Amino acid sequence: MNKRMDNEKRYSTRIKSERCDKIKISSVAAVFLVCSIAIFATRYRQDIWNFDRENGNDHQIENVATGSDASEEASEEKTTEKITTEAATTEKPTTEKVTTEASETEETTTAASSEEGGSTVKYVNIEDPDTSSKGNDWYDKKLYTPGNVTDDAYFDTAVLIGDSRTEGLSLYTGMSNLDAFCSKGLNIEKVMTEPIVSTSDGMLTALEALKQKDYENIYISFGINELGWIYEDVFIEDYKAFIDAIREIQPNATIYVENILPVSKALSDEDEIYNNSNIKAFNKLLKRMCKDYGDIIYLDVASSVTVDGVLPADASTDGRHCNQEYCEKWLDYIRQNVYIKK
């Protein structure tokens, strides 16, 4: 009897336990289902929102932007209209003012252009110049007027560039206001890169030194050291390269190419390179180069020291470099034969 009651009790307990388990499982399942539905609903709502944003709202934004642009355009149109009105109001007096100023400027320019050759013209006689000392110079008569230096202040804005012969010219004449960029053994190739000018900032090349000051007249003298070059055309090519480089730095300067001074008869007769035949050939090349440029002056300084086609014996101790007396003749030729831009 007792055993039967125990069995029934255990059975009842097991049934209750199973029911509780089923309830728990059902509850968990219900919770899971609710959560799943909530998650799905949230995602679905997000997808709908995104879709709506990517389509409907984009159009809305675009419309807003278009409206803003339209407002700006309308504003700009009003501003433009206002400016146009103001411009129309002020156009006439402003134009009259500009026209008056232009007329005044034109008069000033005409007055300035009538002063030929820059600031140095006041130191040059171009009205009735003495041309009796003029040698075989070449210049374009359409561009230049010949003249004579009347005041050595002309050389304040002039510079000599050359080799040891030019160095002698600078030293012997003692022209403190005449700059000279020169050096012994210098040639037309080396002058482009070799530091030869002493300054407070150190040694400079001739081209670097040209950047330190405005020059109106530049005198170049090379050729004696190049007589031994195998190819004459290289001499001219290098000369042109130097002239072109000068022009970039000093575009308004008048450039004189001095021809090569002769050597003595004794030196010319015994030397296969440094002789007057070679010098004449090189001078022809220089003159042709000046003509090709058109605005470069070929200055026949050689005529000032030449007697019977050679450098006189008493003009030099080595037959090549002029002494003081002949350097003075050389400088006098430069003084008496200047060319002023028209």
Image (cartoon, helix red, strand yellow):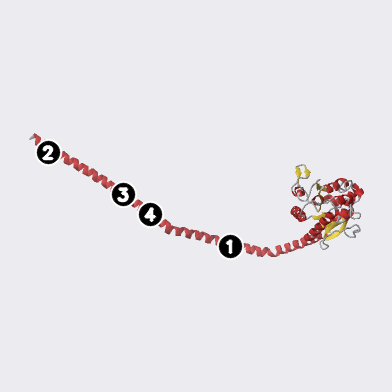
Q: Earlier in the sequence, mark 1 or mark 4?
A: 4
Disc 2, SS: helix
Q: Amino acid at mark 4?
A: Asp
Depth order, front residue of 102/299:
299
Disc 3, SS: helix
Badge 2: few (under 14), some or many (20 or more) residues near its Cα, within 10 Å? few
Circles 3, 1 touching at the beta carbon (< 8 Å): no
Q: Amino acid at mark 3?
A: Ser
Q: Which mark is residue 78?
A: 1
Residue 189, compared with residue 77, is above or below; it is above
Q: Which residue is mark 4?
A: 47
Q: Earlier in the sequence, mark 1 or mark 2?
A: 2
Q: Quadrant of residue 259?
A: bottom right
Q: Which residue is mark 2?
A: 8
Q: Which image quadrant: the N terminus?
A: top left
Depth order, front residue of 253/131:
131
The CA span between labels 2 and 4 is 58 Å
